[in-house]
Amino acid sequence: MLATDLKKEYVKWISHNMEYETIENGIVRIDTPFLDNVSDEIILYAEKVAGNKNLIRITDDGWTVRNLSNYGFTIDKRSKKREKMLIQIASDFAVDYNTLTKEIYIDVSFDKFPIAKHRLLQAILRTNDLLFMRNDTNPSTFREDIEEKLNKYEIFHGRGTPIEGKRGFTIKFDFSIPSLNGKKEKYIQAISAPNNLDYTKIIAANITLLNYDTKAEFYAIYDDLSNDIARKSDINAVYEELNVPVTTLLFSEIDKNIDLLKNNK
């Protein structure tokens, strides 16, 4: 199978599952195949930026944060830690967050629309992850739990290192482990909501958009301590269908599999 075949399959899947509809005043509604925390399709909106005809704004119209509020996870000035984490997520994916309207959005030129939409979707999915924070007094996330393991075993690593992909796509993995002593470079993604296959699809999509080769290894670590994983076979099927080289690990088994991640021995 050729890389071009994989790319065509991914593009076909996206094009068949994205629906565009002009609703009013030049606003375009975009129904995506990705799901939020209540299994509703994530909907985006695109419109021209007022005062600049060369830019369009892609936005979630505030739905992501409002939906979290429905679960009692409010993000506002009274919850400074949560708001700070959301602002950091927006920064990580080079999108914006409006603290007044609660919108997660990005303003881009027309030719950057596909890249920007992909980044915005990743930011929205990552924001939904905030629902899985341990608690407010110690707002640790699953990523921090993984980093504790990497530190425990003295595995040198970086966080959120951007990787240049095809056609200008910039991909970020949660952790990168550099190549040392002949070991391959490794990239790790944390999945705190393992039963939502959209997270798995995003990882697969990101890797297909990379100019990767056999010198890199990819790992997805799934949080099976906070979740009973009911769709493990479906998770593996996503990677196999796209022929994406990802090793899946359960967090409960990370200690016995830690040698897979080590770069110093």
Image (spheres, rainbow, N blue to C red):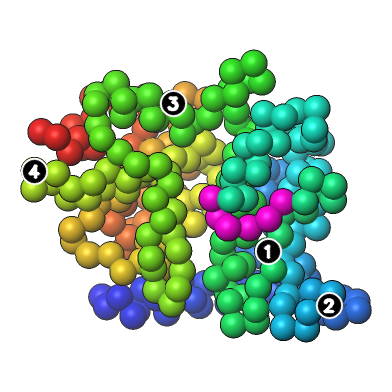
- Residue to which mark 4 is pinned: 181
> Sequence order check: which comes first, mark 4 or mark 2?
2
Q: Amino acid at mark 2?
A: Gly
Frontmost of labels 4 and 2 is: 2
Q: Can see residue 238?
A: no
The residue closer to the viewer here, 154 or 7, is 154
Question: How far apart are labels 2 and 1 at the CA level?
Answer: 16 Å
The residue closer to the viewer here, 176 or 52, is 52
Say whether residue 183 is left or right of residue 176: left
- The outermost residue toward the top is 137
Residue 51, disc:
2
- Residue to which mark 3 is pinned: 145
Of the 4 image quadrants, the one containing the N terminus is: bottom left
Q: Can see residue 65?
A: yes
Question: How far apart are labels 4 and 2 at the CA level?
Answer: 55 Å
Q: Is residue 95 magenta?
A: yes
- Residue to which mark 1 is pinned: 106
What range of the chain is rendered magenta?
92-97
Q: Amino acid at mark 3?
A: Asp
Say whether residue 263 is left or right of residue 207: left
Question: How far apart are labels 3 and 2 at the CA level?
Answer: 45 Å
